[in-house]
Amino acid sequence: MTETPAPSVTYGPPEGYAAGATRDLVVDLHRRMVRIRMFEESAGKLVESGDMPGFLHLYVGQEAVAAGVMSVLDDVDQITSTHRGHGHAIAKGAEFRPMFAELYGKTTGYCKGRGGSMHIVDMSRGMLGANAIVGGGIPIAIGAAFAAQYRGDGSVAASFFGDGATNIGAFHESVNMAAVWDLPVLFVCENNGYAEFTAQGNHMRLDDIAERANSYGIPGVVVDGMDALAVRAVAKIAVDRAKRGEGPTLIEAKTYRYFDHQGIKGMRIPYRDPAEVEAWKARDAIRLLEVIGVERGLATPEDFAATWAQTEAEIADAIEFARSSPDPDPADILDDVYTV
Amino acid sequence: MNTRELTYVKAFNEGMHQIMAEDPDVFLIGEDVAGYGGVFHMFDGLLTAYGDKRVKDTPIAEQAIIGLGVGAAARGLRPVCDLMFMDFIGVAMDQIFNQAAKMKYMFGGAVSVPLTITTAGGAGMSAAAQHSQSLEAWLAHIPGLKVAMPASPYDAKGLIVGAIRDDNPVIVVLNKKMLGVKGPVPEELYAIPLGVANVVREGDDVTIVAIGRMVIEATKAAASLGELGISAEVIDPRTVQPLDIGTIVTSAKKTNRVLIVHEAVEFGGIGAEISSQVQESAFDYLDAPVTRLAAPFAPVPYAPILESAYVPDAARITAAARKLVERS
Amino acid sequence: MAIEVLLPKLGLTMEEGTVDEWLVNDGDLIAVGTPLLRLATDKIDVDVEAESEGILAKAVPNGTTLAPGSVLGWLLAPGEAAPGGAVAPAAAPTAPAAHLGRQLVSPNARRVAQELGIDIAALRGTGPGGRVVSEDVEESALAQPTKVTSPLARRDAQLAGIDVNGLPTDTGYVTRKDVREAISGQGSGTPASTAPISPAPAVIPPGQESSSIIPLKGMRGTIAARMVQSLTEMAQLTHGYEVCTDSVVELRGTLKEQYRDFGLQVPSLNDFVVRAAALALRKHPILNATIVDREIHLLRRIHMGMAVAVPGGLMVPVIRDADTLSIFELARATRDLAESCRSGSISLDALEGGSFAVTSLGTYGVDFFTPVINPGNVGILGVGRLRDSGRWDDDRFVKTQVLTLSLTFDHRAVDGAPAAEFLQTIAELLARPLVLLPGA
């Protein structure tokens, strides 16, 4: 750990960040996370059973980041996502039916079967698209933020990316330009410790990626990415700042993915210590919120159980919908390349 | 319609002024486009006229310039992102070919990207290998992009307006060596639709398809050929993507001989595509192999003597056309 | 030792041939069998192949017309001097492959040639590398010897309806200026047609224009000349005569059935008619005759000409001693000759010496027509369509199959009654087709 952090980097949300939490908020955050987890685990099984095509980068373990940030965004606020983007889409309000249909490559999918797992989009929810190029969505997010500033519509943008993406030129170019122009954007780095299979210590000298904010003259903040309330708290501060016209914030949420870079079967190579995986799972974000909620009397175990049950039913319905949806027609293969 | 003589760059600049006046969603970003008006004066006066909210200098950050344009365009604005020299496009290529080009398709039509990228290409000024390239084939190869290459002042204005009004990502490649070329330009705002070739000169004996500045050289060559009794038709595709192959094939069927000229390297160039499509569509109308005249497979050299050997010119076009129609 | 390349004698009556085009270059190293040049005669064009190897030294240019046996060039050893003076290069050069054995033709030239019915093989290519280009075809269609012109001059001339070949030019190269001068001086008369087959100067009717032009030269010219000659020199008339073919049809049916498993070819209806005609000629020699100097010469041998349609015209190859052949030999000979004509590999000899001819339009649905006698013969038999008819068999009306024979004969030699008797004989033979099977 760096002993003397740069002055502009803060650690964690302010004291008492969870004090104002309500039942509605806890249930809402919980619901977003449960929807992500159940979707991901179902999708993973469907691909590995061969029922569904493609391959998946699953978000399981990182749910608190998407849930926390999205809980302070509205539909008019835009996000850009990553190859590991299902969680962002679901937390932003995307529906299961068109998501599963897209994964099945059906016409009823979000992209009519053109995009698949890595390109879920929902313009009605401000989900500007998942992106299969690491760092590819970051410049697009500053474009969305620019549009908000240009129109003065009071909306903000948020870009999600991993620790690996902060080594890419697009990250530096975008954060710098957003800083120079005070664009209303949140740069949300989900630091899960690995750039694909390469540990953070092998791809950068920093422990805290938030320190990179110093280079661009903007605030950086480190937050526990397993604590949805904490993530929400720092995101709220960043959104307010952006809406005041004070420019971007770099949020580093320290989190962990339970599955491999791709798929659910686990590790092809022992690049992670099993003890490390178990240690993170012990702090599971959903479990943590359930404990906090019950301990503080904000919600009951029945509230949480109802969400799990309801989500399970929705998943089953969406899979059935996707399976029975029509396949795309190869005759339409040239549609939407460009308008003539 | 009142028409007067304008230079290529002034015509382009007038198009920018008029479209920005017409459409408040149009904005311009790029390196030195605001205060300096662009290194080629393409953007003179725009900052004064439309203010620093709509005309902005950027850091030297091509990925962010284009990416910002992609995001803003996806949100419904009509960004013009300048890349100064076409050679710099490589720095921004991910945003161009993975993001801008594919968004509409891979999102199932849910997103449109009405983004215009302006840049200047072409050799002939001893700007050497990294400031002289013609990379249109590279871009035209990517489904989702449109590529316009104005070859006259009239087209410089009409194509930038057409590009900005188009709902797709369009790269408008000006030619550095043509900036001072004069020609008639209407005063009013007008747009040239993308994908419609210009038959610059009609002829019967040989079709010369020329791209970008080569249109000027081909037109000169056509005049020389006329003195030799050879009637050359000169076609400027205007946009290499979409490519108006119909006009070219119609001409090929009329003249039975086709020469394609561009300053990009010959290997894998647009000429190869045109040649292939012509023989596929008009094989039984050809009296000679479809022939290309283009740059050799080398980076653009610096020394004037090398560079002039590198870029096709009117004399070589004339010779190549004569060879095509030669009879013993 | 220089080996002479001679102009071959391709047929008994061949008097001269024209070097239409050298297919190889002076100085090329020639292998045995390499096509050297295309030779044109009044009947056919053939490629002359090298019978030895060596370095080519040409003695004559394209377009030279000479008698058979004339020296066209030499095949030399490296370094050897040709008798004509040219010296072969010491080191044998490699010949450009494109010239060896393959005529270069642009796709457009092929298309235009097909539209205009022009035989590409007879054209000299003027495009790069000697490629036949569409202009070669179009100029050939205009039946004009090519004069070197600029494309613009050609077009101007075409628009003004001027024959560039009739234009004076001091450079040898017709330019737009020459055409302009010709246009300004027009009215003093355009060059007259010299075609012997078109005695009266004809014009294109007012308000009409040519959509395409087919020159009366080559095979087309030969046909035109011979047909005009035939109709102006002879007193031709035609008998139509219906014959019953039931027996032949029945026999063919039997043969088909029995031959099927053995893959044997069943002679065609036409073969039976030719065979019957050949035998009938034995009985009616007046129709197997020729008129020479006010004398009718009855000919001993029966050489049957048979008309074969080929693209752009027709040929009349000859089956010698046709009356001696079995129907099967006749059928095979007919097939082989027709194939040779269509493939262009027919020899000049095979086109000469017919004493009578048969022509069929039956497959085109024609019943009766008036065939035109080949000059030198006194008759030609036309075979019409096989069609259903009926006849009374006692009180019973039965279906039958018939065809109409159209016999054109030269009244100078043959009168109406003998001609009709000849037809009767054919009809009788066709009624007893087993008689037609054996030869001799």
Image (cartoon, helix red, strand yellow):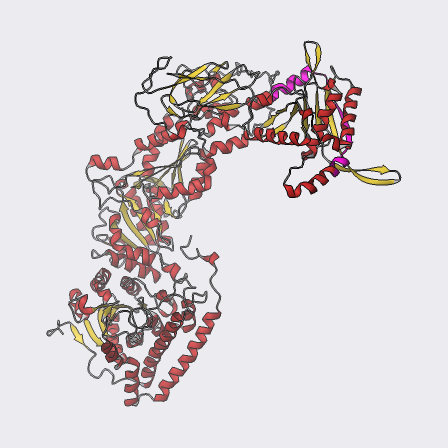
Q: In the picture shown, does residue C116 fall above or below A31?
A: above
Q: Is residue B170 magenta?
A: no
Q: Does residue A202 appear anywhere in the picture?
A: yes
Image quarter (top left, top right, bottom left or bottom right) of the N terminus of chain C: top left
Q: Nearer the viewer, residue C397 or C138?
A: C397
Give, as a single range, the part of the protein colored magenta. Answer: C223-250
Q: Give coordinates of residue C138: x percent, y percent.
A: 50, 27
Q: Does residue A233 appear anywhere in the picture?
A: no
Q: Give coordinates of residue C58: x percent, y percent.
A: 40, 18
Furthest toward the top, the residue is C293
Q: Nearer the viewer, residue C178 or C24?
A: C24
Residue A260 lies left or right of residue C61; in this view the side is left
Q: Nearer the viewer, residue B1 or A70?
A: A70
At x 35%, y 13%, the residue is C85
Residue A78 lies left or right of residue C368; in this view the side is left
Q: In the picture shown, does residue A65 fall above or below C425?
A: below
Q: Give coordinates of residue C132: x percent, y percent.
A: 45, 28
Furthest toward the left, the residue is A4
The quarter holding residue A197 reads bottom left
Q: Give coordinates of residue A241: x percent, y percent.
A: 23, 72
Q: Is residue C237 magenta?
A: yes
The quarter holding residue B155 reads top left
Residue B145 lies left or right of residue A164; in this view the side is right
At x 67%, y 27%, the residue is C325
The quarter holding residue A54 reads bottom left
Image quarter (top left, top right, bottom left or bottom right) of the C terminus of chain C: top right
The mark tally for this picture is 0
